[in-house]
Every structure is written in structure tokens, then in C-alpha cells.
């Protein structure tokens, strides 16, 4: 068993000191509401400039995929932007897409020599993904990666902004 931890905390992801923090982005990568807007506001214009370059080079980010930018003014080295699925009843591949958000973000973090990474509760806000299912998928994806991949990640933090997500995630650990 590798030496790594999965922590569940309640807090503001923009304040987390980690090698990478994950942004629950939209396809355009141009900022938005919720955690996406908070990360862009706290990180400053450098993040948006990097996002614009990525979109100009490769187009929008598809659901389940992830890209990496600078962290600007944030206490992290990188922001990994991943696009979570909008919940439409679960019959349009939403669980698999959400699993991929976590897996692809972890792969990018590992590729950038990150040892610590912090995730928000992807898709549980305006994208309406059921919070208990989202928590189960997030934790399973993280554990699968940590246990079955060659990596240097030693700490994964799931940062819950609201009490409901925090309670659900803590009960599943």
C-alpha cells in the first residue's frame, strides 16, 4: 500500500495550500458561478489568460476532461479545470463522466509532479448531480487512482463548501 491520504474538510478551496486545486469549470473555461467564479476571482486574470490560450489552441474542454493552468494569486501551484456533467437523470453517462473528472484531474496532477491535490464537490451545485452519488463516485475514483496507478500523490483533499456535502462525504470515509 502506498503512503497517501484522503481527507474530507469543510472550507474554501481558494484558501487551500496544495500543489494543485481543481476547478469545477464549464466547457468554455471562461469562468462562471460557484467554485469556478470563486477560483477565477481569487486567482486573478492570469488564470483566465491561460484558459483563453488553451481554448484557442484546442477548443473547449469536453465534459469529463481536464486541463491545467497557472494558479495566479492562489496558494496552489496549479489549477486543474475539469468539466463535470450536468445531471439529467443518470442515463446519459453522467456517473462515468464524473468519475473521469476525478481520474483525469489526478492524472494531470501527477504529470505535473504534484504531491497534493484538492477537489471541490464537482457537479453538485447548479449541475444538480445528486450529492450522495457524487460523493461515492468521487471517493471511488480517487481510491481507484491511488491504489492502482503509479503516482507521487501523497494527499488528496475533498474540500466541501457546504454542510450537506461535508456530512455526506464524511459518512462515506
Image (tube, helix red, strand yellow):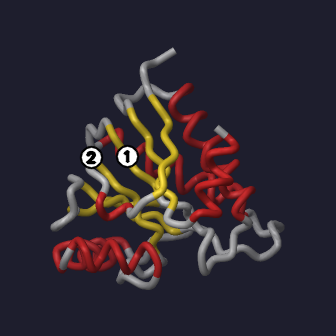
Q: Secondary structure at mark 1?
A: strand
Up-down relation of residue 140 to residue 87 (above or below):
above
Residue 121 picture quarter: bottom right
Q: CA distance from mark 1 to mark 2?
A: 6 Å
Residue 169 screen position, x and y as percent: 63, 49
| Residue marked by disc 2 | 19
Q: Residue 137 bears which disc, if any?
A: none
Q: In the image, what residue occupies the spot 55% across and 40% down?
A: 142
Q: In the image, what residue occupies the spot 67% across and 58% down?
A: 134
Q: Residue 117 bears which disc, if any?
A: 1
Lateral position of residue 128 relative to residue 81, left or right: right
Along the line of sight, the residue nearer the viewer: 95 or 123:
123
Which of the image's four quarters has the C terminus? top right
Along the line of sight, the residue nearer the viewer: 63 or 57:
63
Residue 21 screen position, x and y as percent: 35, 56
Disc 1, disc 2: CB below 8 Å?
Answer: yes
Up-down relation of residue 173 to residue 138 (above or below):
above
Decide which of tag 1 and tag 2 comes sooner along the chain. 2
Q: In the image, what residue occupies the spot 33% across and 77% down?
A: 55
Residue 138 screen position, x and y as percent: 61, 49
Lateral position of residue 55 relative to residue 139, left or right: left
User: Furthest residue to the top?
Assistant: 1
Along the line of sight, the residue nearer the viewer: 153 or 173:
173
Residue 126 screen position, x and y as percent: 60, 81
Amino acid at each position: 500500500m502506498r503512503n497517501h491520504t484522503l481527507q474530507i474538510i469543510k472550507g474554501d478551496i481558494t484558501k487551500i495550500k496544495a500543489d494543485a486545486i481543481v476547478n469545477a469549470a464549464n466547457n468554455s473555461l471562461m469562468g462562471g458561478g460557484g467554485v469556478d467564479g470563486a477560483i477565477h476571482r481569487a486567482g486573478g486574470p492570469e488564470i483566465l489568460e491561460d484558459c483563453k490560450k488553451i481554448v484557442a489552441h484546442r477548443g473547449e474542454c469536453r465534459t469529463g476532461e481536464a486541463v491545467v493552468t497557472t494558479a495566479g494569486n492562489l496558494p496552489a501551484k496549479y489549477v486543474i479545470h475539469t468539466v463535470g456533467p450536468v445531471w439529467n437523470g443518470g442515463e446519459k453517462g453522467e456517473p462515468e463522466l464524473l468519475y473521469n473528472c476525478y481520474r483525469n484531474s489526478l492524472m494531470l496532477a501527477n504529470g505535473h509532479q504534484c504531491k497534493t491535490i484538492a477537489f471541490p464537490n464537482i457537479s453538485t451545485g447548479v449541475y444538480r448531480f445528486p450529492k450522495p452519488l457524487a460523493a461515492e463516485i468521487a471517493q471511488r475514483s480517487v481510491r481507484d487512482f491511488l491504489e492502482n496507478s503509479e503516482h507521487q500523490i501523497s494527499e488528496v483533499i475533498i474540500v466541501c463548501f457546504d454542510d450537506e456535502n461535508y456530512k455526506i462525504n464524511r459518512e462515506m470515509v
